Structures are given as C-alpha cells and as structure tokens.
Amino acid sequence: MQPADIAPKDRLIVALDLPGVTEAEAMIARLGDSVSFYKIGYQLAYAGGLPLVQQLAKSGKKVFVDLKLHDIGNTVARGVESVAKLGATFLTVHAYPQTMKAAVEARSGSGLKILAVTVLTSYDDGDLHAAGYRLNVSDLVEARAQQAQVLGVDGLVSSPEEAAALRKIVGHQMNLVTPGIRPAGTATGDQKRIMTPARAIAAGADYLVVGRPITEAADPRAAADAVQAEIRQALG
Ligand SMILES: O=C(O)c1cc(=O)[nH]c(=O)n1[C@@H]1O[C@H](COP(=O)(O)O)[C@@H](O)[C@H]1O
C-alpha cells in the first residue's frame, strides 16, 4: 500500500498491552471510533487474546499481530499460515534472512503483510554491542532493511529516528511502522529511540504504534484523539 492510500485515522495503531481480554475489550470500548487499528502482542496473546483478532477484524477494525516470530524456517512458515487465517493485517517477525524468507513465502496468497523488526526501539548502540553486534543501530537497521526489501517483506518496524533514512533506501514500496512514539510530556519508560507523533510523521513514518501513552492515560480516548489530531496536522 502506498502511504498516500493510508487513511489518516488508520495511521495510529494502539498497542493493547493489557493483562486480559476483559481489559482489552474495555479499552476498545473506551476508545470507540477514535481508533481503527489495534496491536495484539505477547501480553494479550498469551492471555487468551488471539480470538480477539478475528472479533476485531469482523467489527471492521484492523489488527496487527505482534508475535515477533524467529525460529527455523519451517516453524516460522507454519506459524505464519496459522496467523494468516485470523484475518490480521500485519504480523511481525525478526529481521533475520531465513525467518523473513520463510514468512514471506508462507503469507503469499493471504491478505497478511509481514513486518520485519529491524532493531528494537529499546536498544541503543551500547545494547547492541552488549548483545555481540559490531554494527551501530543505524547501520544495522539499514542493513536489515536492505535484506528485507530483497526478500519481498512488506514493511519495516523501526524507531522514527531511522524513518527518513529508511525511506531513502526502500522508497514507498514498504510500509514504515514506528513504535517509540512519545507525545510531548509523556513518560519515556523503557524506550530509548523516541519521537513525538508529529515528528515521526514528518520523518516519513506510515504508521505510529502507541501503547502506554494512550492505555495508561487518565483519559485514553482524549489521549488517542490528541495523537490523531497531531498526525492530521503533520500530514497537512
Ligand atoms: O514490534 C513492535 O511493535 C515493537 C518494536 C519495537 O522495536 N519497539 C516496540 O516498542 N514495539 C512494540 O510497540 C509497543 C510500544 O508500546 P509503548 O512503549 O507502551 O508505546 C509495544 O507493544 C512494543 O512491544
């Protein structure tokens, strides 16, 4: 999908990082029509949240299944086939060549798009070096983006800090999905490579993933509306 084709409202993806289905359904009801795209990750998926993918898709919402798959190729492929049946829009895998290749092959013919996680937004250069990598964050993000593009991956997950450089590499052929979003004045938490919604859109991000700044706000709907307004303003 070309960025121009993305409805402004769909550019905000709210991470439902909540303890269970009851809490997730309450949050979805609270956010109402201000949010059209949700992400279900480890916490909710492992607490019985996967059926919510089909439920949300049936109700007209889009769903990003964030399982960050990484395993031998056959296991990744079979996992992708199962997720494709749920009706999700996006699924994450880690940006390792075998994993990306298996995921892309397994999703073909379905409506599911594969997103490759380049370098987690909670990592800086020191964290990468501690994990045994010799490249710094920006070089590793760019190298992985190039590999992902060659392998036919549909989109990239990175910090908005890398969005402008990634856009130069992949053009508009791949979706750029950016967590590490922090509206002005909100707590950084464990994120290290962050930007405000407006700056992320200006840098070229297609989709912004926002969790705690919305779900832990005193008024989540007002927080989501504020992010949506910032996105619309940045899009001009
Ligand atoms: O794949 C992701 O969505 C992801 C990748 C990444 O590099 N960093 C990152 O924070 N995420 C996810 O994005 C969400 C960010 O949540 P908040 O930090 O609460 O806004 C979480 O659900 C993370 O799992």
Image (cartoon, helix red, strand yellow):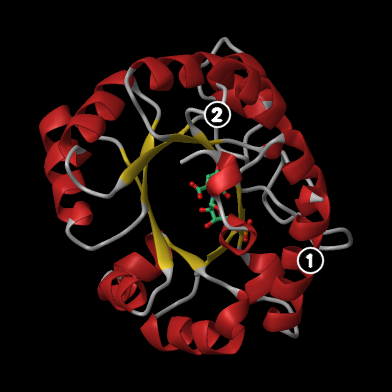
Determine whether, in the image, residue 61 is placed left or right of residue 198.
left
Asked if residue 133 is positioned above or below residue 207 in the image, the reply reads: above
Residue placed under numbered mark 1 in the picture: 229
Task: State whether residue 181 is above or below residue 163.
Answer: below
* Foreground of the two, 99 or 47: 99
Q: Is residue 54 left or right of residue 34?
A: left
Query: Label 2: few (<14), some or many (≥20) within 10 Å?
Result: some
SS for callout 2: loop
Q: Position of residue 9 (x, y in %)?
A: 62, 64
Could you tell me if residue 155 is visible in this image? yes
The answer to whether residue 220 is above or below residue 166 is below
Residue extending farthest to the right is: 185
What is the spatial separation of the Cα atoms under label 1 and label 2, in whole angstroms? 24 Å
Identify residue type, mark 2.
Answer: His
Q: What residue is rendered at 89% in x and 62% in y? A: 185
Residue ID for mark 2: 172
Q: Nearer the viewer, residue 30 or 172?
A: 172
Relative to 41, does residue 133 appear above or below in the rendering?
above
Q: Assess mark 2: CB under 8 A from ligand 1?
A: no
Q: Give the residue at x 46% y 81%.
A: 24
Pick whichever, 84 or 16, lies toward us.
84
Residue 69 position in % (x across, y down): 30, 42
| Residue at image location 56% in from the left, 10% down from the top | 134
Secondary structure, mark 1, is: helix
Decide which of tag 1 and tag 2 comes sooner along the chain.
Answer: 2
Which amino acid lies under the numbered mark 1 shown in the image of this protein? Ala
Image location (x, y in percent) of residue 228: 72, 65
Which residue appears farthest toward the front when viewing the image?
5
Q: Position of residue 132 (x, y in %)?
A: 50, 17
Looking at the image, residue 74 sits to the left or right of residue 229; the answer is: left
